[in-house]
Amino acid sequence: MGALTFAQSGGAVHPTLDDVAELALEYGYEKKPPRPSQSKPSQRADMAGFFTEYGVKAFSPWREMFVRAPMLPPDEHRAAVEKVRERFPPPAIELNLI
């Protein structure tokens, strides 16, 4: 498979862990301290940070999201989430525990 892109989301592409790791690296999700460039993409990429951006904790749920529906790159996804939060703020909850 060629380089994975978000334009392929919501389609018939079933990415591998290394495909997603390369995508994460492309968007700046790199482990600190950086690993040697000859390491596999999945060893160099900050996969936990990348998955957390989309509200999941592992590869399989992220891949299901990718296959099921179109997805936005991390920066665009973050902006879309913020826009929704501004429009629909969480309700203020007052707890009276006395």
Image: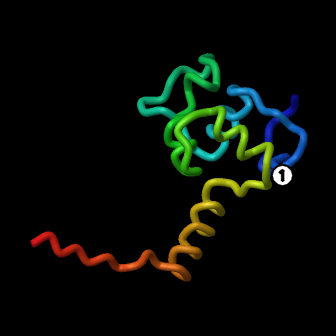
Q: Position of residue 70 (x, y in %)?
A: 79, 55
Q: Hey, which residue is sitting farthest front in the picture?
A: 98
Q: Where is residue 4 in the image (x, y as percent from the top left)?
A: 80, 39
In depth, the one of 38 and 49 nearer the eye is 49
Q: Where is residue 68 in the image (x, y as percent from the top left)?
A: 79, 47
Name the image quarter holding the N terminus. Answer: top right
Q: In this view, does 39 lie to the left or right of 90?
A: right
Q: Residue at x 85, y 46 (%)?
A: 8
In depth, the one of 23 and 34 nearer the eye is 23
Colour scheme in the image? rainbow
Q: Can you say whether 30 is above or below 82 in the image?
A: above
Which quarter of the picture shows residue 23?
top right
Q: Hey, which residue is sitting farthest right in the picture?
A: 12
Q: Can you say whether 9 is above or below 83 in the image?
A: above
Q: Which residue is drawn at 51% across and 23% down?
A: 35
In depth, the one of 83 and 37 nearer the eye is 83
The amino acid beneath tag 1 is Ala
Q: Residue under circle 1? A: 7
Q: Is residue 7 left or right of residue 53?
A: right
Report helix, strand or loop for mark 1. Answer: helix
Q: Can you say whether 10 is above or below 44 in the image?
A: below
Q: Residue at x 35, y 79 (%)?
A: 92
Q: Hey, which residue is sitting farthest bottom in the picture?
A: 87
Q: In this view, does 40 lie to the left or right of 69?
A: left
Disc 1: CA contacts within 10 A as few (<14), some (14-19) or many (>=20): few
Which quarter of the picture shows residue 40?
top right
Q: Where is residue 18 in the image (x, y as percent from the top left)?
A: 70, 26
Q: Residue at x 62, y 54 (%)?
A: 74
In depth, the one of 31 and 18 nearer the eye is 18
